[in-house]
Image (tube, grey):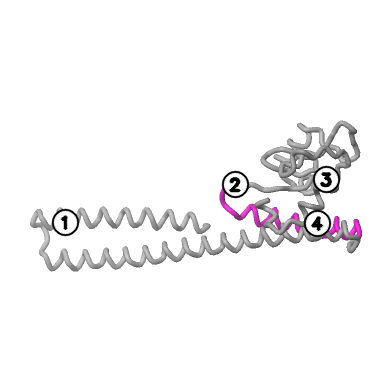
């Protein structure tokens, strides 16, 4: 049973306790119980409400805290990917080491993202998409006929932050806003060196 299920149970319990309090008032007004009995039972219900509310709040706070931790983890991993790509360009890291490290980090990213609720806009390189076990990306690859070994002189850079660029020396493709976008070597260096969070570029 996960946190969300427990919170739902507590919410239902609180609704049930509220109904019990209303029923207790009707019984009192009907003269079926004394004020002493009413006060005793009402306080008992209120104590249960307080405990349920405190537990519900703690669980929600813990869930939000865990979500924040996961989001920070995503930002760290994405920053590492950009840093490794930058090292590769600068010659400080070999291609084999880069592929090995990026694959490990990508797996970590996939694991964390599955724990985060809701959808968030992400930018992914072609290699990340191919390494991803997601069927959605497999379908996307087939639909768009993605092939790293195929290069066409007609394909030019489509950097969304530099739309005037028409370079054809495509270095990488990124997954941005639901589309595969080719990026030239020069633009990719600029993107990799930008002092921003990778997920919010």
Instruction: Give the residue at mark 1.
Output: 25
Q: Nearer the viewer, mark 3 or mark 1?
A: 3
Q: Considering only order in the chain, which callout, 3 or 4, is on the residue closer to the N terminus?
A: 4
Residue drawn at 9 percent across, 53 percent down: 30
Q: Considering only order in the chain, which callout, 2 or 3, is on the residue closer to the N terminus?
A: 2
Q: Considering only order in the chain, which callout, 2 or 1, is on the residue closer to the N terminus?
A: 1
Residue drawn at 65 percent across, 57 percent down: 112
Q: CA distance from mark 4 to mark 2?
A: 23 Å
Residue 174's spot in the image, x, y percent? 76, 44
Q: Considering only order in the chain, which callout, 1 or 3, is on the residue closer to the N terminus?
A: 1
Q: Quadrant of residue 163?
A: top right
Q: Considering only order in the chain, which callout, 4 or 1, is on the residue closer to the N terminus?
A: 1
Instruction: Give the residue at mark 4.
Output: 102
Secondary structure of the residue carrying tag 3 is strand
Q: Quadrant of residue 48?
A: bottom left
On residue 172, the disc is 3
């Amino acid at each position: 049973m996960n946190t969300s299920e427990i919170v739902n149970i507590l919410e239902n319990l609180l609704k049930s306790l509220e109904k019990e309090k209303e029923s207790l008032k009707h019984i009192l007004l009907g003269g079926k119980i004394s004020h002493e009995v009413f006060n005793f039972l009402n306080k008992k219900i209120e104590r249960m409400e307080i405990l349920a509310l405190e537990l519900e709040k703690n669980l929600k706070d813990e869930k939000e805290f865990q979500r924040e931790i996961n989001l920070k983890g995503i930002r760290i991993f994405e920053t590492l990917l950009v840093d490794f790509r930058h090292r590769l360009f600068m010659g400080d890291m070999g291609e084999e080491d880069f592929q090995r490290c990026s694959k490990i980090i990508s797996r970590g990213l996939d694991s964390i993202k599955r724990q985060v609720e809701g959808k968030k806009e992400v930018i992914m390189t072609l290699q990340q998409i191919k390494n991803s076990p997601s069927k959605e990306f497999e379908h996307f690859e087939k639909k768009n006929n993605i092939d790293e070994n195929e290069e066409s002189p007609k394909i030019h850079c489509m950097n969304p932050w530099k739309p005037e660029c028409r370079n054809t020396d495509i270095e990488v493709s990124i997954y941005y806003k639901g589309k595969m976008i080719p990026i030239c070597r020069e633009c990719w260096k600029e993107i990799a060196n930008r002092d921003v969070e990778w997920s919010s570029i």
